Image (cartoon, helix red, strand yellow):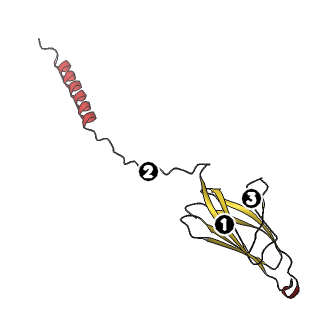
Amino acid sequence: MRGSPIQNFIFVLALLLVMAAGIVVTTREVPTTTPHPIEKPPQATDQTEVTVRMIFSHPPEKVNVQRADSDQKSEDIQPIHHQVDLLLTLPVEKITEFFIDVQWPELTGSAGQAEAHYFTQIIIRQDGREDDVIIFADTDSTLSDVFKIDTRTHQK
């Protein structure tokens, strides 16, 4: 006996479906992706060194520079001549603000207060970047202002 033709048809159909599924699974192309290097986001501990040179019109009596985001009391800087060099360690990929206070002695005599001009030039040097230059000028013998140092690699 040969069995029912419907049963034979269903058996052959099931066998063909299993074979077709096997062929599809074994010959299917697996998409290959090229791994792209992932740029590591800066860590909170990533730091960079920045050189700051301050040049003054006249030797100041007192210079004070303090990070705006720091609660630490800043130290007064005692400039010997017309300039001061600072080496700062700052977080990368961030804009850091600084308060600057400069006090000059009052000019008297032929260079009286009416003719006195005071300035501070700040030159910020970072590896791999052009120098940033900031200039503060006034006729007042006291300077209190804010400057920023940008350590971001891609400026906007």
Q: 108 left or right of 52?
A: right
Quarter occupied by the C terminus: bottom right
Badge number at residue 52: 1
Residues packed near mark 2 inside 10 Å, few (<14), some (14 to 19) or many (20 plus): few
Q: 4 left or right of 56?
A: left
Check the image and name the residue furthest to the left: 1
Q: Position of residue 151 (x, y in %)?
A: 60, 61
Callout 3 amino acid: Ala
N-terminal label among 2 and 3: 2
Residue shown at the point (57%, 51%) measured from the top left: 42
Callout 1 amino acid: Val
Separation of marks 2 and 3 at Cα, in angstroms: 36 Å
Residue shown at the point (75%, 78%) measured from the top left: 57
Q: Secondary structure at mark 2?
A: loop
Residue shown at the point (19%, 24%) measured from the top left: 12
Callout 2 amino acid: Pro
Which label lies toward us, 2 or 1?
Answer: 1
Q: Which residue is mark 3?
A: 68
Q: 132 left or right of 101?
A: left
Q: Nearer the viewer, residue 47 or 1?
A: 47
Residue shown at the point (77%, 53%) measured from the top left: 72
Which label lies toward us, 2 or 3?
Answer: 3
N-terminal label among 2 and 1: 2
Residues packed near mark 3 inside 10 Å, few (<14), some (14 to 19) or many (20 plus): some
Quarter occupied by the N terminus: top left
Q: Which residue is mark 2?
A: 37
Q: Secondary structure at mark 3?
A: loop
Location of residue 89 with respect to 14 vertically, above or below: below
